Amino acid sequence: MTQTKQPLLHVENLKQHFKISRKFTTKAVDGISFDIYEGETYGLVGESGSGKSTTGRALIRLYDPTDGKIIFDGHDISGKLSKEDESFLRTNMQMIFQDPMACLNPRRKVSQIIAEGLEIHHLCKSKKEVDEKVSRILDKVGLSAEQGTRFPHQFSGGQRQRVGIARALVMNPKLVIADECISALDVSIQAQVVNMMKDLQDELGTTYLFIAHDLSMVKYISDRIGVMHLGHIVETGTTDEIFENPIHPYTKSLLSAIPHPNPVVEKKRVAITYDKDAQGVDYTKGTQHWLSDTHYVLATDEEFEKWNSK
Amino acid sequence: METVKRNKNDRVLYIRDLNISFKTAYGTVRAIRGVRLDLFKGETIAIVGESGSGKSVTVKTIMGILDSNGVIDSGQIVYHYTDKDGVEQEVDLVKMSQKDIRYKLCGKHIAMVFQDPMTSLDPTMTIGKQIMEPMREHYKISKEEAKTRVLKLLEEVGIDNPDKRFKQYPHELSGGMRQRVVIAIALACDPDVLICDEPTTALDVTIQAKILELIKDIQNKKGISVIYITHDLGVVAKVADYVAVMYAGRIVEKGKINEVFYDPRHPYTWGLLSSMPDTDTNSRRLFAIPGSPPNLMERVEGDAFALRNPYALNIDYKEEPPMYDVGGQHRVASWLADPRAPKVQLPAELVEKLEKMKKEAFKDDTN
């Protein structure tokens, strides 16, 4: 692959295994590699249990990765973290969580919640500077500074998610991991939040790793998409490549499952089923087959022939 | 597409002018404000709306499981059924006590599938026992007979290896399988009305399609009527014959699915349709309905949607719009449908989207 740009995040052969018992280990993420470039949005999609959230959590080091290499802006953050690397990681990578009620401390005011990161990392010289930053970010996410004095329960779901986003962005991070950050919201509010995230990206140049299971939303926000299934990235490419020319049968089945709000068409449509075992697909045997500079499929040679010819 | 003739004699359930409020510590919440709805035999209706719009409260009332602080202020819910002696009965659910509804109708005549299959199953009971429970309770049949029925039912809902599954516990199954079990329980006593409250929200897209196809299949086989509660217009498009869009406790637009989807008349429906991301347009921004739903604790003056509505007329702030008949089965509660109202142009993006939808639909027809 000939990319002249240096990736912001480079992930190579990342593995995250969980030992359940002496005999059994869950391989939640089993050797995935991808790059995220500065200023873009990388969407990670897949069904539940495919390991997309685990990937996000391993990247921000909520877990200790079993194996693999993570290079974030020139720092290796995969092994044991040195103090410098840790503080670099904690200030420059932030996460937005799925459930906006569960991730905000109900006993603290919104302004305190947002300021917490700034205070812990001593990023501001004075209390006044903290307040300034908090009110500026509140304004950016569409809340008033006055609302900062309220508690999380006084907000609606969409507003709470805005607080979650403000908390992540106040650190001025290079990379934000958004883990299913809109799936708990109502449809009309989802669009508001997605638009806001896009506007903020244009303004601040933040990079997003957008984890979701809703492909149609992912299409709107992402520049590139990775499709995960059972701990493997089975296909990755730019949004157009994935939607116009999906190769892997799993990607096809995911795309066919998106409901369209068009009754006549929708009633006739039958989703494509994908059964890995029935088709005899073994992800560990597959290798990356490149279709273009950005688009690859995980497959063995024969599988690639078969899928690509169709 | 087979359409159900909405003949008065085939009416299974009808709701008239239903008003429900909740007494809370902070005041009274008027959750349902004058809902009117019909359900016919073999028909699928979908109630669409945001959380807090009152769609769940409506069906909970039908099931007699309204929360204890909820009060039915007025209205009627008439349910028409044939009892076990073959006599046709008509009962007003509002006049019945919740206990009566639950003993006489729930399970046997009206059954419900809930959103989250994990919380609606008992983790300490095997699958088989849970499906047998309603049968044994309602039909007073022996264990052996119940078991044979359960095995058949499990097969019907697409669970392979029913003998093995019979003895398993809910935690041993995947989310999709669990939801199938919940559907099996709901179908255990051959109900006439199946209520599905967001049956697929907790599931993955790939499994979602399967579950919807399953419910449709069963409906075709057994001729039952289904009420869907959902906020996903894609799901609605797939399953429904008839749609009711709810906003702030009122039905703002209802009609046959094609009427509502290809010719929406209410600004809220416009917003909903425009904010659905679709996979073939490439515009950078999603349309979003500004603001958030009103607090029903306060008295709603005029149209509840007026504050979020760029097309609001002066009268929208003063008086609540009545239901207008806009042809066919299509009804809309918006002042824009009044003959005196100024003509408004739909948002350009939506017009384009509708045109495309119609083109796709039409193309399929000619093939």
Image (cartoon, rainbow, N blue to C red):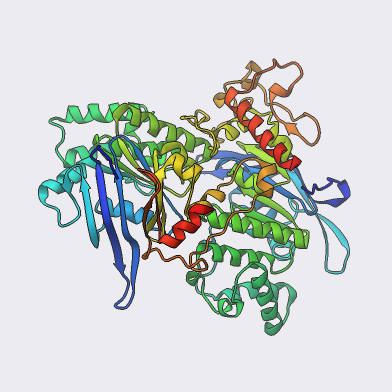
Instruction: Relative to B127, say whether B252 is above or below.
Output: above
Q: Is residue A28 visible?
A: yes
Q: Position of residue A58 (x, y in %)?
A: 28, 55
Instruction: Relative to B152, say whether B351 is above or below.
Output: above
- Left/right placement of residue B167 relative to residue A168 reads right
The quadrant the C terminus of chain B occupies is: top right
- Left/right placement of residue B96 relative to residue A64 reads right
Direction left: furthest residue: A83
- Residue plotted at (35% across, 62% down): A28
- Left/right placement of residue B143 relative to residue A231 reads right
Nearer the observer, B142 or A265:
A265
Q: Is residue B17 visible?
A: no
Numbered circles on residues, count? 0
- Left/right placement of residue A289 relative to residue B283 reads left
Q: Position of residue B223 (x, y in %)?
A: 78, 59
- Residue plotted at (59% across, 51% down): B198
Please identify the quarter of the rendering in which residue A18 is found. Answer: bottom left
- Residue plotted at (52% across, 36% down): A188
Please identify the quarter of the rendering in which residue B322 is found. Answer: top right
Please identify the quarter of the rendering in which residue B233 is found. Answer: top right
Instruction: Relative to A90, say whether B68 is above or below.
Output: below
Q: Position of residue A135 (x, y in %)?
A: 29, 27
Nearer the observer, B124 or A248:
A248
Q: Position of residue A302 (x, y in %)?
A: 45, 62
